[in-house]
Image: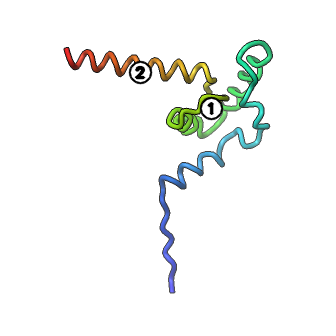
Amino acid sequence: MEWIRIVDTRSSEHSDWRTRGACTREDPELFFPIGNTGPALLQIEEAKAVCRRCPVIEQCLQWALESREDSGVWGGLSENERRALKRRAARNRLQARKAAAG
């Protein structure tokens, strides 16, 4: 009897990107600095350097935005950068709605 393997490509893809991240070979604490001033700035830049060489940087950022991850460096962006990105996207959506309405 043959077994047929049924794979949910969305879930396997979702979990697979995490195993391919450059961060898997780094200390996880690097990506979660305490604060965003002083020594934390250097830590943030070191984490971003890892992200820049990561093959799944886009999936990581997308996951962080969709899951509303508000701490740490994800997808090459710091907490503050992701917040700013979300604000810009919200402003753009609002402007698009206003333009469509009037």
Q: Which mark is residue 13?
A: none
20 and 89: which one is in front? 89
Horizontal relation, residue 11 to residue 53: left or right: left
99 and 55: which one is in front? 99
Rendered position, 46 above or below 58: above
Horizontal relation, residue 57 to residue 22: left or right: left
Residue highlighted by disc 2: 90
On the image, the x and y values in percent for residue 98 come to 27, 16
Q: Residue at x 56, y 24 (%)?
A: 82
Q: CA distance from mark 1 to mark 2?
A: 20 Å
* Element on which disc 2 rests: helix
* Element on which disc 1 rests: loop
On the image, the x and y values in percent for residue 83 come to 54, 21
Rendered position, 86 above or below 26: above
On the image, the x and y values in percent for residue 90 come to 41, 21
85 and 57: which one is in front? 85
Residue highlighted by disc 1: 74
Tell me the quadrant of the picture where the C terminus can be found. Answer: top left
Horizontal relation, residue 13 to residue 79: left or right: left
On the image, the x and y values in percent for residue 43 come to 76, 23
- Outermost residue, bottom direction? 1
